[in-house]
Amino acid sequence: MSTRGVRDYDEADLSVEKPKTHAAGPTAVAVSMYRSLDRMGPIRTAKTLLDLNQAEGFDCMSCAWPDPDPGHRHTAEFCENGAKAVAEEADTRRATPDFFARHSIAELDSHSEHWLGQQGRITHPMVKRPGGTHYEEIDWDEAFDLIGAQLRALDPDEAVFYTSGRASNESAFVYQLFVRAYGTNNLPDCSNMCHESTSIALQESIGIGKASVTLDDVYDAELIVLAGQNPGTNHPRMLSALEKAKKNGAKILAINPLREAGLINFKNPQTPRGMIGPGTDLEDLHLPVRINGDLALFQAFGHLLLEWGAVDHEFVREHTTGFDLWKQHIETLDWAEVEATTGLSRAVITDAARMLRDSSATVFCWAMGITQHHNAVNTVKEITNLAFLQGNIGKRGAGLLPVRGHSNVQGDRTMGIWERAPQHFLDAIQKEFGFDPPRENGLDTVDSIRAMRDGKAHFFLGLGGNFAQAAPDSDVTFQALRNTKMTVHISTKINRSHLVCGDTALILPTKGRTEKDIQASGPQWISVEDSTCSVHSSRGPLEPASPYLKSEVEILTRIAEATIGDRYGLDWKGFRDDYRNIREHISRVVPGCAGYEVNVRRPGGFVLPHPPRDSRTFQTESGLGQFAVSPIEALQVPPKHLLLQTFRSHDQFNTTIYGLSDRYRGIEGGRRVIFMHRGDIAELGFRDGDFVDITTRWEGDDRVRCAENFRIVEYATPKGSAAAYYPETNPLVPLDSTAAESNCPTSKGIVVSLTPASARHAASGDGQDQVRSDEGHKSHPQPEHLS
Ligand SMILES: Nc1nc2c(c(=O)[nH]1)N[C@H]1C(S)=C(S)[C@@H](COP(=O)(O)OP(=O)(O)OC[C@H]3O[C@@H](n4cnc5c(=O)[nH]c(N)nc54)[C@H](O)[C@@H]3O)O[C@H]1N2
Ligand SMILES: Nc1nc2c(c(=O)[nH]1)N[C@H]1C(S)=C(S)[C@@H](COP(=O)(O)OP(=O)(O)OC[C@H]3O[C@@H](n4cnc5c(=O)[nH]c(N)nc54)[C@H](O)[C@@H]3O)O[C@H]1N2
Ligand SMILES: [Mo]
């Protein structure tokens, strides 16, 4: 049995309390300040936090939630988790060549992701040579030469170029240009594991894969639907927007297996009411949907709205196609199937549908609870059907709002980081640079893993991110990466991906968004796009963590020079010397970016065009909004099995584990927990507090996937629906279990069974490197392979 148990705490330190019924408030401020001062000290704390999300400051790297207009920002325009993200990057600790000399790669690999991140910022470029046991310092020039030589020895389609959504527009544009000039479209990104289902669905139904609202629409909405999203933790600044909407009279409908604290009540730290008063109640109705019940639920809403005649006939007639077919399908709805799939009664579904009926301006928000399922693309299309039905597109206070994850994941796509970039984008590249980029689709994340596993790709470059730990099926992904000739990571801090290496492995340390970037022509700034298509500039206030760091643009252009030299006359030096040269090309290649340099420098930036939002026009095949018909598909769960969703705690950013406090859900001092319904615990013969191993049941292959030693926590989740944290549970997500059409891993819908833990209280470490968790507990690093 192959398992991997990343443990960074001692079970004895894990405590479970009652979940909270409000988010933010004084505790959030205290935690922000404590973490910031602890990691950065007082001067850097003041320098960074006062600059964060200000018009002339830097963009928060935590999430992609939009900023208010420049005139309406607070002195402290950030949230607890934004402060933690800044503290994590502006960390004063350093992982120097000396550190790497003291710790072999195997030893580092025995530590948890939390511990790795605590070692501080990487200061020098590092290499692991073939057969080597340690990373050693390498000269930048030699590093670029090694990469260039390796890439020139390969067929371009044998190389994989990954991007994590923190990269700026400038680095993303340069990166995709290099990769295409080199000769491949193998540009997988984190979006492939995230909102890909949204992009595919919206592209088909409204002709553009992005949100159709502005922040003002959220403020003006009469109803806000929050489906499969936990804003209190993952988009905390969204709570201020929801509060404002509530003050303006909006209602909130939350659709989530869990009653997340951030959906219940918000204590806004910017207001006295939030600091010492009762806060603002947010949700008006919470539907504790069974995992993956959303498609059936949205169809039931459609059914009731049709029955009640709550239809914007003019919008449907003028702007959409496919209504009649959809209507026929929806009218035959089987309520018994809906109730079984959603775990909700017809009565409560009807209450929720009334909220839709009574609203003339609804904003639909969603995130990973919707997109990471087998039927995710269809679910997003069903949300869009509902928006069409009531004309909630291109109308004030209404629209579709897929809430993006990484702070610039949307911008990276706009700049061409896409393994299936549209032909018109490739045409524009050809026209601008005079070479014909490859036209066939490249590999996405899952296909890249398959290609490396099968010996068809031999090179992996990661522009940020933590591919090894973020991708599904950890054992398969690790093996795939280890199969390669070379892995290269452009990173700020040590993570698992540096330890799961190819024959040669390179770590290229880069400047983060908090840091100054000075090039030949002087200080540079970069630009990013948020969830609502708003593009603006960002400049860091701090001195870089080490004098040896290079910016992402510098690193990428040097790799390009070392690989393809001046092929096609591309002026890589000009790009890095002055980022204005990059933006000039962006202004001619990327749709909607004419005048980019000027527009993006305006305070608050500019908003990219969005035809459905701006003029109710749809660049779909039919030129109209496309109603879609989808069969209800329910995940089949055999007796004695559960559906497991893998989600985020309040103290992490994806694979970066800030600390061990999932405060809102009452978990402190540990992460290996599985949240379960009381009835399931009893029926499976366990008790709250028992330790279990989790095993995946999947028909796609006969591989046994197991994650060991999780403590059962009784929790208010629908019967049959369980939850545990990512990335500890990634070994359980089968590589080939992906969403139809989008190929996004089904991280929110895994069928699992539980057995009593086999490795309970395994050896408690070597005693040398005690990890200090943020709550002051002592915990011990433990071997990851517990067998
Ligand atoms: N602090 C912080 N901020 C972040 C991140 C982070 O890790 N930390 N990550 C960033 C990234 S990349 C992303 S993509 C976003 C993620 O933001 P979210 O999508 O909010 O993240 P998850 O924790 O995956 O939470 C998904 C929510 O969906 C619910 N859910 C699970 N399954 C279902 C289902 O079948 N139906 C419904 N209706 N709900 C379901 C879960 O209970 C949970 O509340 O956040 C971004 N912002
Ligand atoms: N089971 C399960 N798996 C999931 C998910 C889930 O919900 N469940 N969610 C999926 C989602 S939504 C996403 S987006 C992916 C996330 O996948 P990734 O984006 O690959 O992962 P992150 O953890 O965000 O990447 C963190 C690393 O980025 C590097 N980094 C930080 N700042 C910078 C910078 O400024 N520049 C550079 N170059 N590097 C930097 C640091 O070295 C850090 O270790 O994971 C996916 N995987
Ligand atoms: Mo994401």
Image: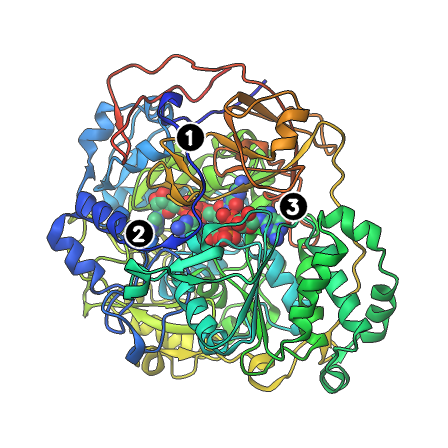
Task: Give the residue furthest to the top.
Answer: 763
Identify the residue shown where x is 60% and y is 21%: 686
Give the color scheme: rainbow, by chain, secondary structure or one colour. rainbow
Task: Give the residue furthest to the left.
Answer: 43
Disc nearest the viewer among 2 and 1: 2
Q: Is residue 537 above or below residue 119?
A: below
**Ligand 1: does it lie within 8 Å of the C-beta at label 3?**
yes
Q: Which residue is mark 2?
A: 28
Amino acid under label 2?
Ala
Which disc number belongs to residue 503? 1
Residue 680 image point, x, y percent: 65, 30
Residue 134 image point, x, y percent: 30, 26
Disc nearest the viewer among 3 and 1: 3
Quadrant where the N terminus is found in the figure: top right
Q: Earlier in the sequence, mark 2 or mark 3?
A: 2
**Ligand 1: does it lie within 8 Å of the C-beta at label 2?**
no
Report crowding for label 1: few under 14, some 14 to 19, many 20 or more residues within 10 A (C-alpha).
some
Relative horizontal placement of residue 725, taking residue 490 as reference (left or right): right
Q: Nearer the viewer, residue 402 or 137?
A: 402
Q: Quadrant of residue 320?
A: bottom right
Q: Earlier in the sequence, mark 3 or mark 1?
A: 3
Report crowding for label 2: few under 14, some 14 to 19, many 20 or more residues within 10 A (C-alpha).
many
Q: Nearer the viewer, residue 751 or 419?
A: 751
Identify the residue shown where x is 74% and y is 32%: 699
Identify the residue shown where x is 65% and y is 54%: 742
Residue 179 image point, x, y percent: 47, 56
Q: Which residue is mark 3?
A: 291
Amino acid under label 1?
Asp
Answer yes or no: is residue 749 visible: yes
